[in-house]
Image (spheres, helix red, strand yellow):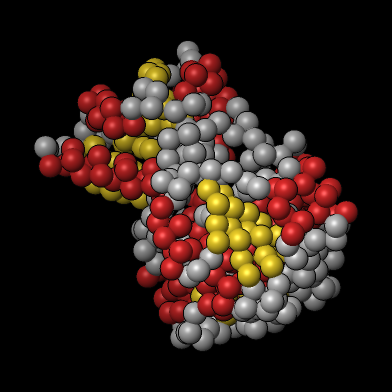
Amino acid sequence: MRIDGKKIFVLGAARSGIAGALLAKSLGATVFVSDKKSGEEIKDTTDILRRHGIEFETGKNSFGRITEFDLLLLSPGVKLPDEVKRELKKQNIPVLSELEFAYRFIDIPVIAVTGTNGKSTTTALIGHILNSAGISAFVGGNIGNALSNLPLGNKRYDVAVAEVSSFMLEDIEEFRPHITVFTNLSPDHLDRYSSYQEYIDAKLNIFRNLKEDSPVVLNYDCADLMKATERFVFQKVFFSKENRNASVFASGNREGFRIESAASGRPVSVLFNNRNLVGLHNLENVLAASAAALLYGAGPEQIENGINSFKGLSHRIELVAEINGVRFYNDSKATNVDSTYVALSSFEKGIIWIAGGRHKGTPYTQLSELVKKRVKKIIAIGEAAPIILKDLGGIADIENWGTDFEGAVRRGFEVAKPDDVLLLSPACSSYDMFTNYEERGERFREIVRKLEGKK
């Protein structure tokens, strides 16, 4: 793909959009970046654009100008109005996601990880296993480092491991991973998609360009995923927590699991004893990551060393501190109900649960049984607080702390007793009060550190 001399309109000035804009500029394109946020809100971003001589606008999207350009580069999460889509199609102006754009300039294999939950941990873990094995892996995509930064950098990698979201998959054309990992499937982003099926269809776009011999790692234990993928023809490599007929399965009582090579059928035993990866959901993540690493060529000893030296991800059931016998866990990355279900399942009882943010359409009633058995108190925050009260009122003691995030954390500590768990697991996006889930998690850490100073 040649873009020197082309004019490119970049919609959205978040991490991926800016990386795409910088890549396009480095390749000789004339770039214009548009973002609805104010210049003050994204000052760090606009400073980067100024330094690179890239024109931009803030506080609006000048859709009327798009037809002046040769290509629209769409940041993940930015929804293009239907009337703009129609006009672009009429004018034969292509729309590419940042994922697709970056992929056109990558000349190494890509291991792509998607799914509703677990994809960040699985992505990071695959990268850690491979890097530990001496295979130089770029880790990024929807996690941390935008994929466009790969061709921008000077370092040479053997493979790219990319977390891929449904938003990123909406506008792909040629993207074809060397290995695909699909962790699981459950309702999410129903604030963006009209139905669960529309969300599924966006996810399944990852299979669009695969061949019959393309390896795809699938969660055998996820009924929705099995149903959604049964019609596809490619090399299916199943992992399971319990089914010994899967290519990769768990045996024992979380003391270890057995990996069987899908290619040769040769049994390979790997011990998993990493206490940074608690809960059955992390066992699934380890199985998925091990399958991908095995397919790429990592050996059993390399996989065992990698999974047991992994430190875990920030903002995902992350132990921040223990104060007066109360353990504080940061699970800010739990931006949907299903992910919070996993977090609540990881603790037997005594949970003071901080939940809320921007509602994403899934009812919280799905958590009722867990809340009854394990949650002592719910402290609801953000726009979703009234909905949480409505869905779970009468099941648990609930207080609404609105936008007072620090007050909510302090209140949780006030009511907690020794051996209790104070868990931030919002089940919502962060956009009502924070820029992203990372900022929300960092703010939680700051507040806990203040409390720690007063113990």
Residue 259 is situated, as x and y percent measured from the top left of the image, at 58, 71
* Residue 207 visible within the image: no
Dividing the picture into quadrants, the one containing residue 365 is top right
Residue at point 48%, 70% (across, down):
52
Vertical order, 247 against 152 (above or below): above
Residue at point 76%, 74% (across, down):
214
Q: Nearer the viewer, residue 295 or 354?
A: 354
Toward the left, the furthest residue is 454
Q: Nearer the viewer, residue 44 or 283?
A: 44
| Left or right position of 214 against 399 | right
* Residue 71 visible within the image: yes
Count of all numbered marks drawn on residues in the image = 0
Q: Nearer the viewer, residue 22 or 311?
A: 22
Toward the top, the furthest residue is 394
Residue 419 is situated, as x and y percent measured from the top left of the image, at 25, 36
Residue at point 51%, 86% (across, down):
156
Vertical order, 282 against 375 (above or below): below
- Quadrant position of the N terminus in the picture: bottom right
Q: Nearer the viewer, residue 26 or 75?
A: 26
Residue at point 45%, 57% (across, down):
46
Vertical order, 222 against 419 (above or below): below
- Quadrant position of the C terminus in the picture: top left
Residue 55 is situated, as x and y percent measured from the top left of the image, at 55, 61
| Left or right position of 81 against 121 | right
Residue 192 is situated, as x and y percent measured from the top left of the image, at 67, 39
| Left or right position of 23 against 307 | right
